């Protein structure tokens, strides 16, 4: 008799996965998280704060060099090059702050918080508000109801959206610029804000941390307004505003393709 066809992947007596004719995406993988962690070399788990700080210094030097080059050349040929390059660096700064939020920047929560506030505030992201909601995202990754970001919108919520919200959310290129709105209002169907300590995003014990981040964000926003009076709004828009928008687009593209 012919051997019965296997419909699922199975692990034989030697621990080798034998592929069947049908892949069940809902089936658990034939390995555990602990096995993955154990396979990673131990040196990869070492958090070296000096190396992390060297990355911060390197990126800040690149940002300053680009600012100097833009003000020196100040031509419409150079500005688009500057916007793309500086927008990339704004995204790099976000990633460094992201590592602070995950605790992978260093073993020191105080250092992580200090550096994370400086980096994220500089690109108008409320560090603790984002950090806490991002933790919720990872704890509920792929859960349509409880994931904090990148959640498919149910039809019942979509049908209740007004026309302007539908245009802003689903008409390119506007969704590429939606991240600032998400920080203020979250996603459609979810209440609260990353700036409000009494938002449903946060527990009572987290409110103080959110207040600190909102205060840092407010300081940075006020600094940008002040610099706009000193150097002019058009100059600040070219130096900071456009790179900020480019960095926001990179933020969206990262989650679309990865």
Image (cartoon, rainbow, N blue to C red):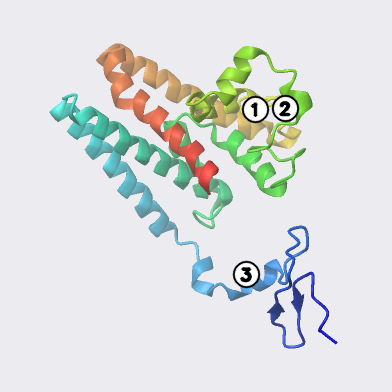
Q: Mark 3 points at which residue?
A: 37
Q: Is residue 173 above or below residue 131?
A: above
Picture coordinates of residue 37, whole percent (x, y):
62, 69
Q: Distance between the residues labelled 2 and 3?
A: 34 Å
Residue 186 - label? 1
Given residues 131 and 244, the one toward you in this image is: 244
Identify the residue shown where x is 46% and y is 32%: 121
Q: In this view, does 150 lie above or below 15?
A: above
- Which of labels 2 and 3 is toward the front? 2
Identify the residue shown where x is 73% and y is 64%: 23
Identify the residue shown where x is 46% and y is 45%: 95
Identify the residue shown where x is 82% and y is 84%: 2
Disc 1 + disc 2, Cβ < 8 Å: yes
Q: Which of marks 1 and 3 is nearer the N terminus?
A: 3
Picture coordinates of residue 49, whole percent (x, y):
44, 57
Secondary structure, mark 2, is loop
Residue 60 falls in image quadrant = top left
Residue 41 - label? none
The residue furthest left is: 73
Q: In this view, does 78 lie above or below 18?
A: above
Secondary structure, mark 1, is loop
Q: Name the residue under label 2.
A: 190
Q: How crowded is mark 2: few (under 14 residues within 10 Å), some or many (20 or more)?
A: few
Q: Residues within 10 Å of mark 1 (few under 14, many from 20)?
A: many
Relative to 91, 191 lies left or right: right
Count the marks. 3
Q: Which of marks 2 and 3 is nearer the N terminus?
A: 3
Relative to 14, 38 lies left or right: left
Picture coordinates of residue 29, whole percent (x, y):
72, 67
């Amino acid at each position: 008799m012919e051997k019965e066809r296997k419909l699922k992947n199975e692990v034989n007596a030697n621990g080798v996965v034998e592929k069947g004719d049908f892949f069940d995406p809902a089936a658990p993988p034939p390995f555990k998280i602990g096995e993955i962690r154990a396979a990673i070399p131990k040196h990869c788990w070492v958090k070296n704060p000096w190396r992390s700080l060297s990355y911060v210094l390197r990126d800040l030097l690149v940002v300053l060099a680009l600012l100097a080059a833009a003000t020196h050349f100040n031509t419409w040929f150079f500005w688009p090059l500057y916007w793309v390059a500086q927008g990339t660096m704004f995204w790099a700064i976000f990633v460094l702050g992201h590592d602070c939020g995950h605790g992978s920047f260093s073993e020191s929560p105080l250092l992580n918080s200090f550096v994370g506030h400086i980096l994220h505030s500089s690109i108008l992201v409320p560090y603790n508000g984002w950090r806490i909601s991002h933790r919720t995202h990872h704890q509920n990754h792929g859960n349509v109801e409880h994931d904090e970001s990148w959640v498919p919108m149910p039809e019942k919520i979509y049908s209740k959206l007004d026309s302007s919200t539908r245009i802003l959310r689903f008409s390119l290129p506007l969704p590429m610029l939606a991240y600032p709105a998400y920080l203020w209002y979250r996603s459609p169907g979810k209440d609260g804000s990353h700036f409000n300590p009494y938002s449903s995003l946060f527990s009572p014990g987290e409110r103080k941390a959110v207040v600190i981040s909102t205060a840092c964000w407010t300081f940075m926003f006020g600094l940008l307004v002040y610099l706009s009076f000193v150097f002019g709004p058009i100059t600040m828009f070219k130096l900071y505003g456009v790179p900020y928008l480019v960095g926001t687009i990179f933020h969206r593209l990262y989650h679309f393709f990865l």
